[in-house]
Amino acid sequence: MKATVIVELKPSVLDPQGKAIQHALHSLAFTSVEDVRVGKLFRISLTDSNLSREDLEEQLRQMCQRLLANTVVENFSYTIE
Amino acid sequence: MRFGIVILPGSNCDHDALHVAETIIGADVVTLWHKETDLKGSDCVIIPGGFAYGDYLRAGALAKFAPIMEPIRRHAAGGGLVLGICNGFQVLTEVGLLAGALMRNEHLRFICRDVHVRIEQDDTPFTSALSLNTVLRLPIAHGEGNYVADDSTLDRLESEGQVVFRYCDAEGRVTRESNPNGSSRNIAGICNAGRNVLGLMPHPERCAEALLGNDDGLGIFQAIARSFAPA
């Protein structure tokens, strides 16, 4: 089973890295770029277990809250397939 | 009194802190390896600068799970002193002992130079030897020193007097130009509500003796030592 976790800065937090990339894209003549936000993507492989979908989601939430995201400044989302 | 200097894999200012505490202040010092589970009688724990666990994931994120953090949490909860310098400040925010977070510097560059900070609070055990509004010249060396918190947290820190150091110019004026990294409200260091846990980005341990050309950082260590001196 595979999970994909995306951690990104909260919309209220400035992202200087995203801004720098936005400017670089502009200088490459991609003038339609309005905004860039940088985040992190984690691909997590999980051993197949008998966990219910709900329990699995709870585990992923815990992983995000305890380690993968700093919820002071970051939001997280995940998908499981 | 006894200082406990935490050594996490990747700490690199541990010996600077040890030198100041032991040689300059003349205190008892023990080192605390990250795998240890007690503080060996430390009165004040220092989490030094460096790149603990390579700063993987986020600065301070993996240090949060070091075995030594559990006794540090208990020490702090019981009112014991904890000082986090630079990477140590980042660790304390990740652990949740201090509010907010330290993000990438606004201009994305690592900065290594002296800055000025103003003493905003003199009623903490870390600043009681310094006068309010004193300007210190201290070195910074960080890529992630941009202090961020939501507005309600910032307002609470201000109203409770938990903003202890603010970036300023040489005359003590808090200006946009004197803010080296984009920190909210020029914040360079904060303490917790109990005033026993303090984190700051500048390095007082790197400038605590005249031999090094600057001893502006010494007062912080003197304040800590004095808070344990018999009355």
Image: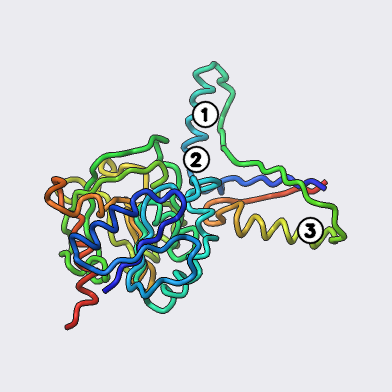
Q: Nearer the viewer, residue B8 or A70?
A: B8
Please say whether residue A66 is visible from this viewpoint: yes
Chain under label 1?
A
Please say whether residue B158 is visible from this viewpoint: no
**Spot occupied by residue A26 in the image (x, y as percentages of width and height):** 52, 21
Quadrant location of residue A55? Answer: bottom right
Mark sitting earlier along the chain (3/2): 2
Dot 1 amino acid type? Ile
**Spot occupied by residue B185 in the image (x, y as percentages of width and height):** 34, 52
How far apart are the alpha carbons under marks 2 and 1? 10 Å
Q: Is residue B20 left or right of residue B147?
A: left
Residue lying at the far right of the rendered structure: A50
At a point 35% along the width and 72% down the height, the residue shown is B42
Element type at marker 2?
loop
Q: Nearer the viewer, residue B32 or B158?
A: B32
**Spot occupied by residue B41 in the image (x, y as percentages of width and height):** 36, 75
Q: Which residue is mark 3?
A: A56
**Spot occupied by residue B157 in the image (x, y as percentages of width and height):** 37, 64
Q: Residues within 10 Å of mark 2 (few under 14, many from 20)?
A: many
Numbered badge on residue A21 = 1
Q: Which residue is mark 2?
A: A15
Labels 2 and 1 share a subunit: yes
Q: Nearer the viewer, residue B218 or B11?
A: B11
